[in-house]
Image (cartoon, rainbow, N blue to C red):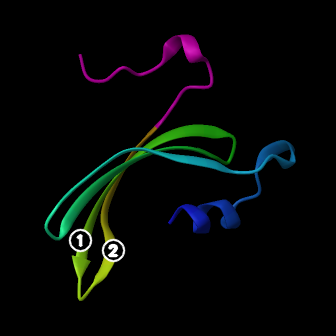
Amino acid sequence: FVAGCAESVPQPGGRTAHAEITAMESVGDIARVTLEDDYAGYRYTDDLTLLRAEGVWRIVNKRFFRHPRDASSSGSGPT
């Protein structure tokens, strides 16, 4: 997933794409991964749900938050 995103959209200013796994948990054949990534000029937090079927991990759900460009108005979650 991360490699595909890095290849699909050129980054502004010729920068390289950045992605970092910040959290990961799994139980049996399900897993959740949180990524912090820069994509198309924005910072995103992605929450991925994965399922292992026939020995292959597949993303079955993705939620994301696009951070504002102004760091002072960061989204800290529901109020």
Quadrant of image for the C terminus: top left
**Viewer-side residue, 9 vs 18:** 18
**Viewer-side residue, 3 vs 66:** 3
User: Which residue sits at x=61%, y=18%?
Assistant: 70
Please tell me the numbered disc located at residue 62.
none
Residue 37 quadrant: top right
Q: Is residue 58 left or right of residue 37?
A: left
Residue at the left extreme of this rendering: 28
Q: Which residue is mark 2?
A: 58
Disc 2 residue type (three-letter): Arg
Above or below residue 10? Residue 51 is: below
Above or below residue 28? Residue 73 is: above
Assign a secondary structure to mark 1: strand
User: Which residue sits at x=13%, y=67%?
Assistant: 28
The verdict on residue 73 being magenta is: yes
* Spot occupied by residue 46 in the image (x, y as percentages of width and height): 42, 47
* Spot occupied by residue 54 in the image (x, y as percentages of width and height): 23, 89
* Spot occupied by residue 47 in the image (x, y as percentages of width and height): 35, 48
Disc 1 residue type (three-letter): Leu
Above or below residue 5? Residue 58 is: below
Q: Is residue 30 left or right of residue 68?
A: left
User: Which residue sits at x=19%, y=65%?
Assistant: 30
Q: Which residue is mark 1?
A: 51
Q: Are marks 1 and 2 in contact (CB under 8 Å)?
A: yes
